[in-house]
Structures are given as structure tokens and as C-alpha cells.
Image (spheres, rainbow, N blue to C red):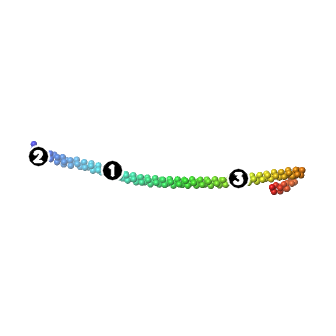
Amino acid sequence: MNINATLLGQILVFAALVWFTMKFIWPQVIKAIDQRNKEIADGLEAAARGRSELDAAQDRVEALVGQARGQASRIIDQANGRAARIVEEAREEGERERQRLVGLAHSEIERETSRARDELREQVALLAIAGAEKILQREIDRSAHGEMLERFTSRI
């Protein structure tokens, strides 16, 4: 066996293998690699889009939360203001009611005072009659001396 012939045979078989691989197998491998590269690139692009959308969504959420906090703060301020107004209105209503009751009490006191004076006048008139009766030792006719008794009670 000649080494040259074996070497030449091996070269021809190797060249045929290279040609067969380059013609039929290599395009499929390159196609699979390109497809895989494309899928990876698409996945990275989708991830980048997702990340940017996530960032935008977080910004929108933060804006909405800020608006909600501001609105909640305004509502709380309005509620506090309304509560203060209600308290003030209740205080004013209580003051009006107090003044009304004090006025009623004053008029009641005035009526009671007037009634007490009238009763006192009647009692003084009766005492005066009793005293005059004892002094004169006779009974005074109430109907005959009624005008005199009325003047006496009005002066008291």
C-alpha cells in the first residue's frame, strides 16, 4: 500500500464529505442558527418593549396615586372645613337657643314678679282692711269703699 494513494483517497473522501456537508447540512445548520438568533433578538426586543411599557405603566401609576392622594387631601380638607362649619353653626344655634331661653326665663320672671306684686297688694289691702276694721271697730263695706281700696292698692 502506497501512502500517497491512501492519502489521496482520504483527501478525496474528506473533500466529498466537506462538499456534502457544505451543500446539504451546512445550510440547514446556518438556517437553524439564524432562526435562533432571530428568536433571541425578538425576545430581547420584546423584553425591552416590556420593560419600557412597565416603566411607563409605573409612571402612570405614580401619577394616578399622586392624583388620588391630592384628591384625598382635598376631600379631607373639605370634610374638616365642613365639620368646622357644622360646629360653628351648632354653636350659633346653641347661642340663639340660650338667648331665647334666657328671654323666656326673663319674661317668666317678670310675670311671676307681677303676679307676686298683685298678690302682695291684695294681701296688703286685706291687712289694711283688717287693721282699719280693728281701728274703727266696725266692718267696712267692701262694695261701698271699693274705689278707695283700689286707689290704695295701686299706690302700693
Q: Amino acid at mark 3?
A: Ala
- Label 1 vs 2, first from the N-terminus: 2
Q: CA distance from mark 1 to mark 2?
A: 53 Å
Residue 4 badge: 2
Q: Secondary structure at mark 3?
A: helix
Going from N to C along the chain, the mark reached first, 3 or 1, is 1
In the visual, does 136 lie left or right of 10?
right
Q: Closer to us: mark 2 or mark 3?
A: 3
> For this view, does 91 lie left or right of residue 153?
left
Q: Measure the alpha-carbon separation of dots 3 and 1.
A: 89 Å
Residue beneath disc 1: 43
Q: Estimate how packed mark 3 is, as few (under 14), some (14 to 19) or many (20 or more) residues with alpha carbons within 10 Å.
A: few
How crowded is the residue under tag 2: few (<14 C-alpha within 10 Å), some, or many (20+)? few
Q: Residue at x 67, y 55 (%)?
A: 99
Residue 134 position, x and y percent, is: 88, 50
**Who is closer to the viewer here, 70 or 25?**
70
Instruction: Give the residue type at disc 2.
Output: Asn
Q: Position of residue 50 (x, y in %)?
A: 37, 51
Determine whether the residue tagged by mark 1 lies in a helix, strand or loop.
helix
Q: Which residue is mark 3?
A: 105
* Picture quarter with the C terminus: bottom right
Q: Earlier in the sequence, mark 2 or mark 3?
A: 2
Apparent side of residue 127 relative to residue 55 in the rendered image (left or right): right
Work out whether residue 144 or residue 130 is closer to the camera in this orientation and state it.
130
Secondary element under disc 2, as helix, strand or loop, is helix
> At 48% across and 53% down in the image, what residue appears?
69
Query: Looking at the image, which residue is at 57% across and 54% down?
Result: 84
- Looking at the image, which residue sits at the far top? 1
